[in-house]
Image: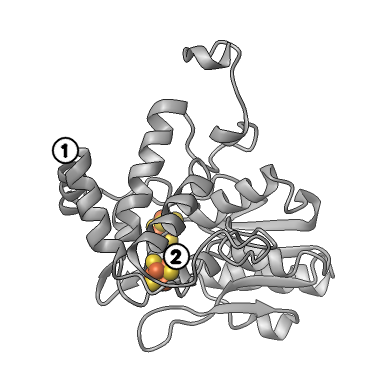
Amino acid sequence: MDRSEKLRQRARELLEKKEVVMVIGFGPPSDSGISPVLFATTPEEAENLTASTSCAQNLANYLLKVRDRGRVAVVARGCDARSITVLLQENQLKRENLHILGIGCEGVIENGRKSTACAVCRHPNPTIYDELIGEPVPAPEPDPEILKADQEFEQLSPDERWERLSAELDRCIRCYACRQVCPNCYCPVCFVDASMPQLLGRTHNLSDNMVYHIIRALHMAGRCVECGACHRACPVGIDLMRFNRRVAKTVRERFGCDAGTDLNQAPALTGFKPDDPQEFIQ
Ligand code: SF4
Ligand code: SF4
């Protein structure tokens, strides 16, 4: 039995036995090769699920929207599973209300090639699941061009990096698509929308854009799972993954934390160690 058939069979069983009220997964790929998100609430609807992992969305985002409906099953690749872990750590989801159908991921294909995030993915297999559909997949060789460009960016002086960042973020139109698709960006009132007091100007000049992106980067530090959903959603093609990878790498190096890979390890910026080498903590 192939992976898609196994997935459909388990989804049907879960719905027939009423173990879950819904299965969230991927529908058949469209002509563009991208699979839409599918919400199956009946065994018949589960017939349309596919194990093709070329889905542009991070499915953890949808769990937040249906968390009051009862127990839900969700198909989870590496990055979906890591986001689910972060949401569990932050008490946004209840583990007993989830049935995680893990699946090894071959990456999202865009315009005939792997998307930027997937081309350097370090965790294609789910880090948390109730059952694994099919076999785990090997981690892909990271795209050398992307790694080289990251290294070049790191080696720039702070002034040069600021210049590069400014040039990129000057193009931002503040549509907030990057925020909307992010499962780990869930505050009921985002700081950009607050009006009493208003914390951020409504224009999309460089200064306001910088404030938005820098504060968001700080909010996501140690929590971003590098799924690339924001990057794919950006209508003006800002290279958000270059900055996300840089922040995630800094957190790994300085705090030894890889977001969402260990349910028992608190996210980097939510805890402290009494033996922290930095004097301020003592
Ligand atoms: S980031 Fe990794 S797990 Fe997520 S879609 Fe891309 S290859 Fe799959
Ligand atoms: S999706 Fe792109 S244009 Fe829209 S707010 Fe985010 S970075 Fe700016």
Occupied quadrant, residue 251: top left
* Rendered view: 5 above or below 81: below
Does 186 sit left or right of 219 as displayed? Answer: right
Q: What element carries label 1?
A: helix
C-alpha gap between disc 2 and disc 1: 27 Å
Q: Residue 207 carries which label?
A: none
In this rendering, the answer to whether 249 lies above or below 101 is above
Q: Give the mark nearer the N terminus: 2 vs 1.
A: 1
Question: What residue do we see at 43% from left, 47% from top?
Answer: 123
Label 2 neighbour load within 10 Å: few <14, some 14-19, many 20+: many
In the image, ligand 1 is in what quadrant?
A: bottom left
Which is in the foreground here, disc 2 or disc 1? Answer: 1
Residue on which the image places disc 1: 155
* Quarter holding residue 111: bottom left
Are there few (<14), some (14-19), or many (20+) residues within 10 Å of tag 1?
few
Q: In this view, does 33 lie above or below 262?
A: below
In the drawing, does residue 26 fall left or right of residue 158? right
Image quadrant in which the C terminus is located: top right
Left/right of residue 231 with respect to residue 277 in the rendered view = left
Front residue of this view, candidates 70 and 12: 70
- Percent coordinates x, y for residue 104 in the rendering: 47, 56
- Say if residue 136 shows up in the picture: no
Please state which amino acid type lies under the numbered disc 1. Answer: Gln
Q: Nearer the viewer, residue 37 or 132?
A: 37
Residue at left 62%, top 47%? 85
Residue position marked by numbered label 2 in the rendering: 229
Q: What residue type is labelled 2?
A: Ala
